Image: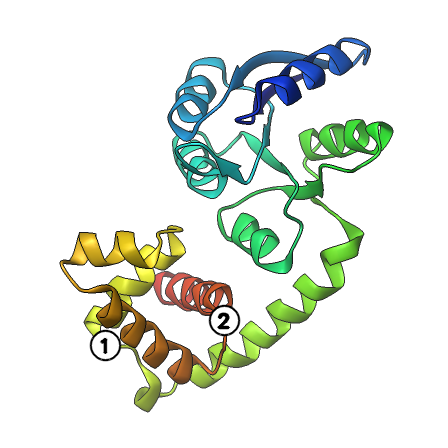
Protein backbone atom coordinates (compact mmCIF):
# COMPACT_ATOMS: atom_id res chain seq x y z
CA UNK A 1 0.00 0.00 0.00
CA UNK A 2 1.14 3.52 -0.83
CA UNK A 3 0.59 5.73 2.23
CA UNK A 4 -0.63 9.12 0.97
CA UNK A 5 -0.88 12.54 2.64
CA UNK A 6 -3.16 15.01 0.82
CA UNK A 7 -2.30 18.72 1.11
CA UNK A 8 -4.80 21.22 -0.32
CA UNK A 9 -6.58 24.25 1.11
CA UNK A 10 -9.94 23.32 -0.44
CA UNK A 11 -12.01 21.10 1.87
CA UNK A 12 -14.20 19.72 -0.91
CA UNK A 13 -11.22 18.70 -3.05
CA UNK A 14 -9.56 16.89 -0.13
CA UNK A 15 -12.81 15.13 0.72
CA UNK A 16 -13.32 14.11 -2.91
CA UNK A 17 -9.78 12.79 -3.27
CA UNK A 18 -10.07 10.78 -0.07
CA UNK A 19 -13.33 9.25 -1.28
CA UNK A 20 -11.84 8.41 -4.69
CA UNK A 21 -8.75 6.84 -3.15
CA UNK A 22 -10.91 4.43 -1.15
CA UNK A 23 -11.77 2.74 -4.42
CA UNK A 24 -8.11 2.19 -5.27
CA UNK A 25 -6.69 -0.97 -3.75
CA UNK A 26 -3.07 0.14 -3.45
CA UNK A 27 -3.36 3.71 -2.09
CA UNK A 28 -4.27 4.53 1.51
CA UNK A 29 -4.91 8.13 2.58
CA UNK A 30 -3.27 8.41 6.00
CA UNK A 31 -3.84 12.12 6.55
CA UNK A 32 -4.81 15.55 5.24
CA UNK A 33 -3.53 19.10 5.64
CA UNK A 34 -4.78 22.48 4.47
CA UNK A 35 -1.74 24.73 5.02
CA UNK A 36 2.06 24.73 5.10
CA UNK A 37 2.29 24.39 8.88
CA UNK A 38 -0.14 21.47 9.03
CA UNK A 39 1.52 19.76 6.05
CA UNK A 40 4.95 19.83 7.68
CA UNK A 41 3.53 18.67 11.00
CA UNK A 42 1.51 15.83 9.47
CA UNK A 43 4.41 14.66 7.30
CA UNK A 44 6.68 14.44 10.33
CA UNK A 45 4.05 12.61 12.39
CA UNK A 46 2.82 10.18 9.72
CA UNK A 47 5.90 9.61 7.49
CA UNK A 48 3.79 8.98 4.36
CA UNK A 49 5.28 7.45 1.22
CA UNK A 50 3.89 10.25 -0.96
CA UNK A 51 2.61 13.77 -0.28
CA UNK A 52 0.12 15.00 -2.88
CA UNK A 53 0.78 18.73 -2.67
CA UNK A 54 -1.05 21.79 -3.99
CA UNK A 55 1.26 24.57 -5.17
CA UNK A 56 -0.61 27.38 -3.43
CA UNK A 57 -1.86 27.10 0.14
CA UNK A 58 -3.69 29.49 2.43
CA UNK A 59 -0.65 30.39 4.55
CA UNK A 60 2.06 30.16 1.91
CA UNK A 61 3.51 28.11 -0.90
CA UNK A 62 3.47 24.37 -1.38
CA UNK A 63 7.08 24.80 -2.48
CA UNK A 64 7.97 25.97 1.05
CA UNK A 65 6.12 23.01 2.54
CA UNK A 66 7.90 20.62 0.17
CA UNK A 67 11.30 22.01 1.09
CA UNK A 68 10.62 21.70 4.84
CA UNK A 69 9.17 18.21 4.56
CA UNK A 70 12.13 16.87 2.60
CA UNK A 71 14.64 18.59 4.88
CA UNK A 72 13.17 16.64 7.80
CA UNK A 73 12.64 13.36 5.93
CA UNK A 74 14.28 12.97 2.49
CA UNK A 75 12.66 9.57 2.02
CA UNK A 76 9.23 11.14 1.52
CA UNK A 77 8.23 11.71 -2.11
CA UNK A 78 6.33 14.90 -2.97
CA UNK A 79 4.03 15.02 -6.00
CA UNK A 80 2.62 18.43 -6.86
CA UNK A 81 -1.04 18.34 -7.90
CA UNK A 82 -1.86 21.84 -9.03
CA UNK A 83 -4.10 23.92 -11.24
CA UNK A 84 -0.97 25.87 -12.10
CA UNK A 85 1.01 23.87 -14.66
CA UNK A 86 3.05 26.75 -16.04
CA UNK A 87 6.79 26.45 -16.48
CA UNK A 88 7.59 28.63 -13.46
CA UNK A 89 5.53 26.51 -11.05
CA UNK A 90 7.05 23.27 -12.32
CA UNK A 91 10.59 24.63 -12.09
CA UNK A 92 10.06 25.84 -8.54
CA UNK A 93 8.69 22.40 -7.63
CA UNK A 94 11.79 20.78 -9.13
CA UNK A 95 14.09 23.11 -7.24
CA UNK A 96 12.33 22.24 -3.98
CA UNK A 97 13.10 18.55 -4.56
CA UNK A 98 9.67 17.38 -5.75
CA UNK A 99 9.41 14.02 -7.49
CA UNK A 100 6.78 15.22 -9.92
CA UNK A 101 4.09 17.67 -10.97
CA UNK A 102 0.72 16.89 -12.54
CA UNK A 103 -2.26 19.08 -13.36
CA UNK A 104 -5.55 18.96 -11.47
CA UNK A 105 -7.44 18.26 -14.70
CA UNK A 106 -5.59 14.95 -15.01
CA UNK A 107 -7.68 11.84 -15.62
CA UNK A 108 -8.25 9.80 -12.44
CA UNK A 109 -6.42 6.71 -13.72
CA UNK A 110 -3.45 8.90 -14.65
CA UNK A 111 -3.41 10.42 -11.16
CA UNK A 112 -3.36 6.96 -9.57
CA UNK A 113 -0.55 5.96 -11.92
CA UNK A 114 1.44 9.10 -11.07
CA UNK A 115 1.13 8.51 -7.32
CA UNK A 116 2.24 4.88 -7.55
CA UNK A 117 5.07 5.74 -9.96
CA UNK A 118 6.41 8.41 -7.61
CA UNK A 119 6.17 5.96 -4.70
CA UNK A 120 8.35 3.53 -6.71
CA UNK A 121 11.02 6.18 -7.02
CA UNK A 122 10.15 7.46 -10.50
CA UNK A 123 9.82 11.08 -11.57
CA UNK A 124 6.55 12.21 -13.15
CA UNK A 125 5.79 15.46 -14.96
CA UNK A 126 2.92 16.61 -17.12
CA UNK A 127 4.02 16.07 -20.75
CA UNK A 128 2.37 19.38 -21.70
CA UNK A 129 5.07 21.32 -19.85
CA UNK A 130 7.96 18.84 -19.99
CA UNK A 131 9.49 20.26 -23.18
CA UNK A 132 9.39 23.81 -21.84
CA UNK A 133 11.00 22.74 -18.58
CA UNK A 134 13.77 20.82 -20.35
CA UNK A 135 14.46 23.83 -22.57
CA UNK A 136 14.57 26.13 -19.54
CA UNK A 137 17.04 23.85 -17.77
CA UNK A 138 19.22 23.94 -20.88
CA UNK A 139 19.13 27.73 -20.90
CA UNK A 140 19.98 27.78 -17.22
CA UNK A 141 22.98 25.52 -17.79
CA UNK A 142 24.26 27.90 -20.47
CA UNK A 143 23.67 30.80 -18.11
CA UNK A 144 25.54 29.00 -15.36
CA UNK A 145 28.62 28.82 -17.55
CA UNK A 146 28.36 32.55 -18.20
CA UNK A 147 27.80 33.35 -14.53
CA UNK A 148 30.94 31.51 -13.46
CA UNK A 149 33.21 34.22 -14.84
CA UNK A 150 34.79 36.45 -12.22
CA UNK A 151 33.28 39.66 -13.62
CA UNK A 152 29.71 38.34 -13.28
CA UNK A 153 29.81 37.14 -9.69
CA UNK A 154 27.00 38.40 -7.47
CA UNK A 155 27.61 40.81 -4.62
CA UNK A 156 27.00 39.56 -1.03
CA UNK A 157 23.74 41.51 -0.83
CA UNK A 158 22.58 40.17 -4.21
CA UNK A 159 23.32 36.67 -2.95
CA UNK A 160 21.26 37.31 0.19
CA UNK A 161 18.36 38.51 -1.94
CA UNK A 162 18.60 35.45 -4.21
CA UNK A 163 18.74 33.07 -1.24
CA UNK A 164 15.30 34.38 -0.27
CA UNK A 165 14.02 34.24 -3.86
CA UNK A 166 14.97 30.54 -4.01
CA UNK A 167 12.97 30.05 -0.79
CA UNK A 168 9.90 31.41 -2.62
CA UNK A 169 9.77 34.77 -0.82
CA UNK A 170 8.02 37.73 -2.46
CA UNK A 171 9.73 41.10 -2.97
CA UNK A 172 7.78 42.50 -0.04
CA UNK A 173 8.87 39.65 2.25
CA UNK A 174 12.50 40.02 1.13
CA UNK A 175 12.40 43.77 1.75
CA UNK A 176 11.03 43.24 5.25
CA UNK A 177 13.55 40.53 6.15
CA UNK A 178 16.57 42.49 4.87
CA UNK A 179 15.30 45.91 6.03
CA UNK A 180 15.21 47.23 2.46
CA UNK A 181 12.61 49.07 0.40
CA UNK A 182 10.62 47.23 -2.27
CA UNK A 183 12.30 49.40 -4.90
CA UNK A 184 15.77 48.46 -3.67
CA UNK A 185 14.91 44.76 -3.86
CA UNK A 186 13.68 45.26 -7.43
CA UNK A 187 16.94 46.98 -8.30
CA UNK A 188 18.98 44.13 -6.87
CA UNK A 189 16.94 41.61 -8.84
CA UNK A 190 17.35 43.64 -12.03
CA UNK A 191 21.13 43.57 -11.54
CA UNK A 192 21.05 39.81 -10.92
CA UNK A 193 18.98 39.19 -14.05
CA UNK A 194 21.50 41.14 -16.11
CA UNK A 195 24.51 39.33 -14.63
CA UNK A 196 22.97 35.88 -15.09
CA UNK A 197 21.63 36.64 -18.55
CA UNK A 198 17.99 35.86 -17.72
CA UNK A 199 14.76 37.79 -17.92
CA UNK A 200 12.54 36.04 -15.41
CA UNK A 201 12.54 35.55 -11.66
CA UNK A 202 12.24 31.76 -11.69
CA UNK A 203 15.09 31.39 -14.20
CA UNK A 204 17.34 33.49 -11.96
CA UNK A 205 16.33 31.40 -8.94
CA UNK A 206 17.02 28.15 -10.75
CA UNK A 207 20.37 29.36 -12.02
CA UNK A 208 21.46 30.72 -8.64
CA UNK A 209 20.43 27.46 -6.94
CA UNK A 210 22.42 25.39 -9.44
CA UNK A 211 25.45 27.64 -9.05
CA UNK A 212 25.24 27.43 -5.25
CA UNK A 213 24.97 23.63 -5.31
CA UNK A 214 27.99 23.46 -7.62
CA UNK A 215 30.05 25.55 -5.21
CA UNK A 216 29.06 23.35 -2.26
CA UNK A 217 30.14 20.21 -4.10
Depth check, front residue: 59 or 78: 59
Q: Kindly report the distance in space between the C-alpha atoms of the residues bearing marks 2 and 1.
A: 19 Å
Among the 4 quarters of the image, the one containing residue 48 = top right
Helix, strand or loop for disc 1: loop
Vertical side of 77 occupied by 22: above or below:
above
Vertical side of 150 occupied by 186: above or below:
above
At x 73% / y 57%, what residue is drawn?
129
Q: Which residue is mark 2?
A: 200
Q: Residue 143: x percent and y percent?
A: 51, 79
At x 23% / y 77%, what residue is drawn?
155
Kindly tell me whether residue 148 is visible in this rendering. Answer: no
At x 28% / y 64%, what residue is drawn?
161
Q: Is residue 148 left or right of residue 10?
A: left
Vertical side of 29 occupied by 129: above or below:
below
Q: Quadrant of the C terminus?
A: bottom left
At x 57% / y 52%, what residue is drawn?
89
Q: Residue 71: x percent and y percent?
A: 40, 36
Depth check, front residue: 171 or 198: 171
Helix, strand or loop for disc 2: loop
Q: Residue 180: x percent and y percent?
A: 16, 63
Q: Is residue 154 left or right of residue 33?
A: left
Q: Residue 59: x percent and y percent?
A: 39, 33
Q: Is residue 106 left or right of residue 55?
A: right
Q: CB of mark 2 within 8 Å of CB of mark 1?
A: no
Q: Which residue is mark 1?
A: 155
Depth check, front residue: 193 or 67: 193
Amino acid sequence: MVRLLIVDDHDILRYGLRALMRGHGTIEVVGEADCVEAAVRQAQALSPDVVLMDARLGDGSGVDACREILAANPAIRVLFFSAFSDEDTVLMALMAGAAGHVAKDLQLDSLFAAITAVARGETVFDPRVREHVVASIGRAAAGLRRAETEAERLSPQEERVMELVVQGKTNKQIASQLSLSDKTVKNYLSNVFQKLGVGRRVQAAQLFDQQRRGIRR
